[in-house]
Image (cartoon, helix red, strand yellow):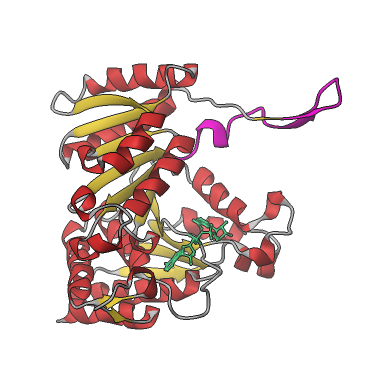
Amino acid sequence: MSKKILVLPGDGIGPEIMAQAVQVLNTVNEQHSLDLEIEEALIGGAAIDADGVPLPDSTLEVARNSDAILLGAVGGPKWEPLDRAIRPEKGLLKIRSELELFGNLRPAMLYPQLASASSLKPEVVSGLDILIVRELTGGIYFGQPRGIRTLENGERQGYNTYVYSESEIERIGRLAFDLAMKRDKRVCSVDKCNVLEVTELWREVMERISQEYPEVELSHMYVDNAAMQLVRAPKQFDVMVTGNMFGDILSDAAAMLTGSIGMLPSASLDKNGKGMYEPCHGSAPDIAGQGIANPLATILSAAMMLRYSFGLGEVADQIEKAVSQVLDKGYRTPDIYTEGTEKVSTEAMGQAVVDALNA
Ligand code: NAD
């Protein structure tokens, strides 16, 4: 049976990096007769320009009928003056919540070839392989009530609500434990339960779930300490699981441990393993249209898609190996360039991965 993939290039560098990822998918599709069917639709600013909304119903409809989604990035200065409710980023939040993509997987792996591109000492980061599991559809980013109100004394006050139900904590917890079973069997749950009741419940539920996974070692860490430990000794972690806001911040910090945000893929999964896959970076308007964006995070996101949504771990391994070979050859887009390596364009980098797959 064919596997339907919806490709959403989005804005800025999105279409440039997506073209390379699609080329890679076409290559493995041909090599292994995977029966991948690729369809394309609009999201973000591109959708606003065409349809007036960041997530047209037609896009959502195709997304619902697809087996997996590969997204470039959305947003840019052109759409910043628009009302918050119809900005490009709203399209992204909406598709994630409509499809109930509650589990965000953000691996931070350091390719040894890039150890010198990290802002930390090579010995602190070389061999780094951590997986941050972030809850994506709940917590303070979605909690009600929210808004800006005027108090009796005339002063304005902004407020948001940090909420998690037991079932929301349970499903993200189980995902983290299941993933840990396939890795080093260690889960570190990050909370702030000394201050926030919502994370007191979080910790209690994590403890309860851990009884179902006797082989997995569970530890807990306050978020402030976790931020410090990530830059002090990041290799101590295997799987980190946390809520939406803490995960947002920690995963960006983890991203920089690896040198370039242009190298990091991510996955957002629903309870059936259907997922949306995207690079961790944004639409990089500062370099859009110049042909210099790093396509590897998107290519690696496509590999994650094959692994997690289609059970094609071996094909995913092959793509990841091809990326490593390309780095071995010294090819670098400007964001990961260091002296003695060869600076290449987005297109040349994508082609090098295809060539490595075909070799
Ligand atoms: P950004 O990730 O787009 O860019 C940050 C810096 O990293 C820039 O200097 C950029 O040139 C560089 N960079 C990012 N991706 C790169 C790549 N593949 N290759 C080389 N360099 C790369 O973040 P930003 O500047 O804060 O945001 C720009 C726009 O993207 C905003 O509109 C923002 O809302 C949007 N955004 C979208 C997403 C998403 O679609 N998932 C995520 C973050 C930001």
Q: Foreground: 292 or 90?
A: 292
Above or below 302: residue 185: above
Q: In the rendered image, which quarter contains the N terminus?
A: bottom left
- Report whether 255 appears left or right of 145: left
Residue depicted at 24% across the width and 22% down the height: 210
On whether residue 139 falls in the magenta region, the answer is: yes
Above or below 294: residue 219: above
Residue depicted at 55% across the width and 70% down the height: 286
Residue 311: name its quadrant. bottom left
Above or below 56: residue 124: above
On whether residue 228 falls in the magenta region, the answer is: no
Q: Foreground: 37 or 285?
A: 285
Residue 297: name its quadrant. bottom left
> Where in the figure is residue 99, as x and y percent of width and height?
48, 46
Q: What range is drawn magenta here?
A: 136-157
How many discs mark residues in the rendered view?
Answer: 0
- Report whether 307 appears left or right of 138: left
Q: Foreground: 176 or 306?
A: 176
Above or below 249: residue 194: above
Q: In the rendered image, is residue 316 in sight?
A: yes
> Where in the figure is residue 18, as x and y percent of width and height?
42, 71
Q: In the rendered image, is residue 274 in sight?
A: no
> Where in the figure is residue 235, as x and y percent of width and height?
21, 42
- Report whether 127 appears left or right of 291: left
> Where in the figure is residue 24, as x and y percent of width and height?
30, 74
